[in-house]
């Protein structure tokens, strides 16, 4: 058994052989070694100018199984002819018994054509006393030389499925200008001793190998969701958006629903859709809380930089008591010009704790904060939300929402549509369609559809709308400050960009860490 490539010192073997034989042909001299392994040794030697080599791209003709039996026993027609010659006369019915079914079938016709045999009644008799088995001779040549001098005959053998052609790469190797019988010792580290003396001038350093593929590193990798999240964050930051603090996953029904004018009987509040928290059983009423204030202050510090430094912002502190009463009023009796829903509004329902079902809960307390000094503002968030849904290929009980909110005087729905078109174009989605939809907190509301070129169909990619006065005015925002917003899942665009068709492969206990690690560091988009 020849030694495996990894157990052999191929570089030394090449040097040894070149000492007595040049050029050498890897196909002959290293026929048992894969050409890839021999190439690695040659690259190593060539980078040190010890050898030179040229790459030969060649086609090799290889015998099929059937052709091997022909080389051993003769062609089918030859076998038929030989059987007839031996017997002098063979009944046609008997032929298969003598030469086998395959040869009887294929060989008979050819033997007739070559005029080697003929029919005599129901039997076969000899015509030629001597024959030349050309097929066998051609195949013998192929076996010996891995090629055939007669190109036409080669095409014919290929057609008859006796020969196949395979591509082979081989190398022709000659001595290089620095050829030596052995690899010189090479130093890989430059030491301070070498630098102090003159040794660095004469030391034989190992050259860099720029052709090496390198070992794959077991390193960490960013999750595709994190990469797409970062792309969204950049788009928002480039357009002057400020990131909202989204750290708390648990919120009260007040911030998740009531403040958003979602009626307490709304189906979205059902056990079907919302995860309720049982311990603690109840939230505090909304109030100024130092931790929340600190988070909002940090966010504001970011947004202030967007305004001229001379601009002073006057602040009127938020009145939580009044806000609570106004939210109740707008649901129960109607207020701010709205007739309301007219149902008995329950404080307990409002103070139930929930896992937030959308990041609009965060937008709500940020907009409430904006009412301290109403002015144009742009906010965004990307974080986790929770819905009590049955899990399937496109739904998870936890996913991420990307949300943008814009406040300004004189905003229009057309402005929102234009903004969304520009926003999604930056993610590579052109050509949007808008469909009227319903959200309790926006009017009008629009679902956003994008055309997926790969799937050749329209996909829902987001939800949007103009926030209702019933939501904004109890906060204390002025009537003429309009706010619009939009939301989408982070998973949907990530699945589109990474070709994932089952959301469970992307997120959750079924996602494969290897898949995450093997994603390219940079995605090159193509249509
Ligand atoms: N909250 C909405 C959702 O969960 C998205 C949205 C945000 C819609 C802001 C309008 C305005 O789908």
Image: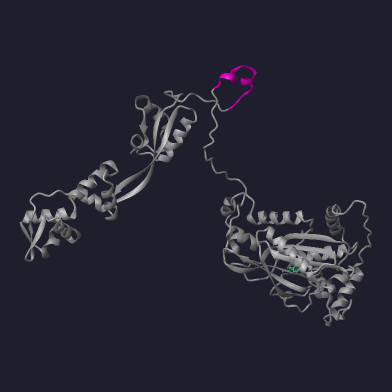
Q: Quadrant of the C terminus?
A: bottom right
The main secondary structure of the magenta stretch is: helix
Q: How many marks?
A: 0
- Residue 159 in the figure: left or right of residue 193: left
**Residue 323 location, quadrant:** bottom right
- Residue 461 in the figure: left or right of residue 333: left
- Residue 365 vs residue 228, the one in the foreground: 228
Residue 178 pos. (x, y %):
46, 24
Residue at 34% x, 25% y is: 20
- Residue 302 vs residue 292, the one in the foreground: 302
Whether residue 65 is situated above or below residue 204 in the rendered picture: below
Q: In the rendered structure, which segment of residues is drawn in magenta?
A: 189-203
Residue 158 pos. (x, y %):
29, 52
Residue 45 visible in the current orientation: yes
Residue 363 pos. (x, y %):
80, 64
Q: Ligand 1 falls in which quarter?
A: bottom right
Residue at 29% x, 43% y is: 146
Residue at 93% x, 62% y is: 317
Residue 53 pos. (x, y %):
42, 33
Residue at 12% x, 59% y is: 98
**Residue 464 location, quadrant:** bottom right
Q: Is residue 200 magenta?
A: yes
């Amino acid at each position: 058994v020849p030694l495996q490539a990894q157990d052999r010192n191929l570089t030394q073997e090449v040097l040894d052989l070149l000492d007595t034989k040049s050029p050498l042909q890897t196909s002959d001299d290293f026929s048992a070694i894969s050409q890839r392994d021999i190439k690695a040794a040659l690259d190593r030697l060539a980078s040190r100018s010890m050898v030179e080599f040229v790459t030969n791209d060649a086609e090799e003709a290889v015998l099929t199984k059937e052709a091997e039996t022909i080389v051993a026993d003769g062609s089918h027609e030859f076998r038929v002819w030989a059987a007839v010659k031996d017997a002098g006369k063979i009944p046609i019915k008997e032929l298969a018994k003598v030469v086998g079914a395959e040869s009887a079938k294929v060989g008979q016709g050819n033997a007739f054509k070559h005029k080697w045999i003929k029919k005599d009644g129901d039997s076969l008799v000899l015509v030629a006393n001597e024959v030349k088995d050309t097929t066998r001779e051609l195949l013998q040549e192929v076996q010996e030389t891995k090629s055939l001098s007669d190109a036409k005959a080669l095409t014919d053998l290929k057609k008859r499925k006796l020969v196949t052609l395979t591509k082979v790469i081989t190398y022709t190797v000659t001595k290089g200008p620095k050829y030596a019988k052995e690899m010189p010792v090479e130093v890989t580290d430059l030491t301070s001793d070498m630098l102090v003396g003159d040794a660095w001038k004469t030391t034989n350093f190992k050259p860099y190998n720029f052709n090496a593929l390198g070992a794959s590193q077991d390193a960490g990798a960013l999750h595709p969701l994190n990469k797409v999240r970062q792309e969204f964050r950049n788009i928002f930051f480039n357009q002057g958006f400020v990131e909202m603090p989204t750290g708390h996953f648990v919120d009260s029904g007040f911030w998740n629903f009531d403040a958003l004018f979602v009626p307490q009987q709304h189906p979205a509040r059902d056990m079907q859709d919302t995860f309720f928290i049982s311990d603690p059983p109840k939230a505090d009423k909304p109030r100024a809380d130092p931790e929340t204030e600190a988070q909002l202050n940090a966010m504001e510090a970011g947004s202030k930089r967007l305004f001229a430094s001379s601009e002073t912002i006057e602040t009127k502190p938020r009145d939580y008591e009044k806000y609570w009463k106004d939210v109740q009023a707008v649901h129960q009796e109607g207020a701010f010009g709205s007739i309301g829903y007219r149902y008995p509004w329950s404080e307990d329902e409002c103070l139930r704790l929930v896992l937030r079902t959308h990041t609009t809960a965060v937008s709500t307390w940020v907009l409430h904060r904006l009412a301290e000094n109403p002015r144009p503002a742009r906010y965004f968030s990307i974080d986790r939300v929770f819905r009590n849904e049955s899990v399937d290929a496109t739904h998870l009980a936890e996913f991420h929402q990307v949300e943008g909110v814009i406040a300004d005087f004189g905003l229009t729905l057309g402005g929102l549509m234009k903004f969304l078109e520009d926003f999604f174009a930056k993610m590579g989605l052109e050509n949007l369609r808008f469909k009227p939809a319903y959200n309790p907190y926006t009017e009008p509301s629009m679902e956003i559809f994008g055309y997926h070129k790969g799937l050749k169909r329209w996909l829902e990619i987001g939800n949007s709308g103009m926030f209702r006065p019933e939501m904004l005015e109890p906060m204390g925002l002025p009537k003429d400050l309009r706010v619009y917003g939009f939301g989408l899942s982070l998973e949907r665009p990530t699945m589109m960009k990474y070709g994932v068709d089952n959301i469970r492969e992307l997120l959750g206990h079924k996602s494969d860490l290897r898949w995450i690690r093997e994603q390219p560091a940079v995605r090159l988009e193509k249509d």
